[in-house]
Image (tube, helix red, strand yellow):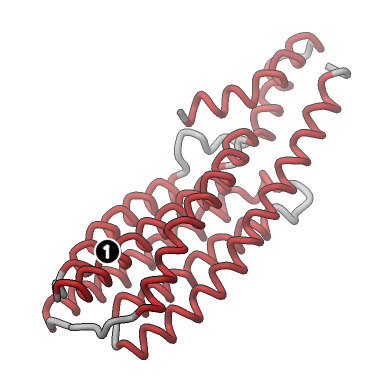
């Protein structure tokens, strides 16, 4: 056990630092994205773009919650509370997108052509999945439910970026004003599901710290503890996949 423990702790430290860098990059990107989207949406009278900007604000909340958790001395002990914050962010996003989409459908809102909005959402469709994949990989290996949940939040925002992009393009090219509100309703339903999972804590919610504690509690022998430490990362990955 003594030979394996330093390697386990060192790997955990690397993964925690990686997650902090990822969520910091996500926060910075989304702050910039939110400002541009809200300004472009207001200029084009686009409810979708304004909603997209507010969605970026929700993403900042989620990423900031994870960043805060991983500045604590024992991040896994703050898991439940951070998951609840992320769940609330999902629910808030779902409510806003639902209200804005229904309002756009009922009011037959026609947004003006927005080259800035199209370019911004196109960039987000590329950047967001990259950030999500990196955080999801690190969070899964670490066994952090909050990092995995935040990665899902980021991927959801990438889906919303794609929906807004499609809506803006279809509205500009064909005058199909209803395309974006319909896509927004689908994403809102997905956000509700993800919020429920984050609130409950899903199958991969067992943190690596809990796994290590369980291994030590279940077996007082050094050999069994050694096997538990070596298999903890694989256990978390198998649980998720």
Task: Bin the neighbour count of mark 1 within 10 Å (Cα to Cα): few under 14, some 14-19, many 20 and up.
Answer: some
Classify residue 96 by image quadrant. Answer: bottom left
Classify residue 166 by image quadrant. Answer: bottom left
Q: In this view, does 238 lie to the left or right of 143?
A: left
Q: Name the residue under label 1.
A: 166
> Is 57 situated above or below 190?
below
Classify residue 39 by image quadrant. Answer: bottom left
Q: Residue at x 75, y 16 (%)?
A: 225
171 and 180: which is toward the camera? 171
Give percent across and percent down for residue 235: 57, 23
Give percent across and percent down for residue 241: 45, 28
Q: In this view, does 185 lie to the left or right of 40?
A: left
Q: Is residue 113 left or right of residue 133?
A: left
Q: If the image is split into quadrants, where does the N terminus sit? A: top right
Q: Residue at x 41, y 78 (%)?
A: 116
Q: Which residue is drawn at 35% across and 75% down?
A: 51
Outermost residue to the bottom: 43
Give percent across and percent down for residue 193: 32, 50
> Is 66 situated above or below 38?
above
* Label 1: element kind: helix
Give percent across and percent down for residue 54: 42, 75
> Is 41 situated above or below 94?
below
> Is 83 situated above or below 41?
above
Q: Which residue is drawn at 26% across and 76% down?
A: 100
170 and 229: which is toward the camera? 170
Q: Is residue 130 left or right of residue 25?
A: left
Q: In the rendered picture of this protein, how many numbered marks are placed on residues? A: 1
């Amino acid at each position: 056990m003594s030979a394996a423990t330093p390697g386990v702790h060192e790997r955990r430290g690397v993964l925690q630092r990686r997650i902090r860098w990822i969520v910091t990059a996500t926060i910075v990107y989304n702050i910039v994205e939110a400002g541009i989207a809200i300004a472009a949406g207001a200029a084009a009278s686009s409810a979708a773009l304004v909603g997209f900007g507010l969605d970026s604000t929700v993403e900042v909340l989620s990423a900031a919650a994870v960043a805060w958790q991983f500045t604590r001395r024992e991040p896994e002990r703050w898991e439940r509370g951070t998951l609840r914050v992320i769940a609330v962010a999902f629910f808030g996003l779902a409510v806003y997108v639902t209200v804005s989409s229904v309002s756009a459908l009922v009011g037959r809102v026609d947004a003006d052509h927005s080259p800035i909005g199209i370019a911004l959402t196109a960039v987000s469709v590329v950047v967001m999945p990259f950030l999500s994949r990196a955080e999801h990989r690190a969070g899964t290996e670490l066994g952090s439910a909050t990092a995995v949940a935040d990665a899902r939040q980021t991927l959801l925002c990438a889906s919303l970026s794609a929906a807004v992009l499609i809506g803006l393009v279809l509205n500009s090219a064909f005058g199909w004003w209803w395309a974006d509100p319909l896509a927004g309703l689908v994403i809102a339903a997905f956000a509700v599901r993800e919020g429920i999972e984050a609130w409950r804590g899903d199958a991969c919610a067992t943190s690596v710290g809990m796994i290590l504690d369980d291994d030590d509690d279940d077996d007082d022998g050094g050999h069994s503890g050694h096997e538990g430490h070596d298999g903890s990362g694989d256990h978390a990955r198998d649980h998720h996949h």
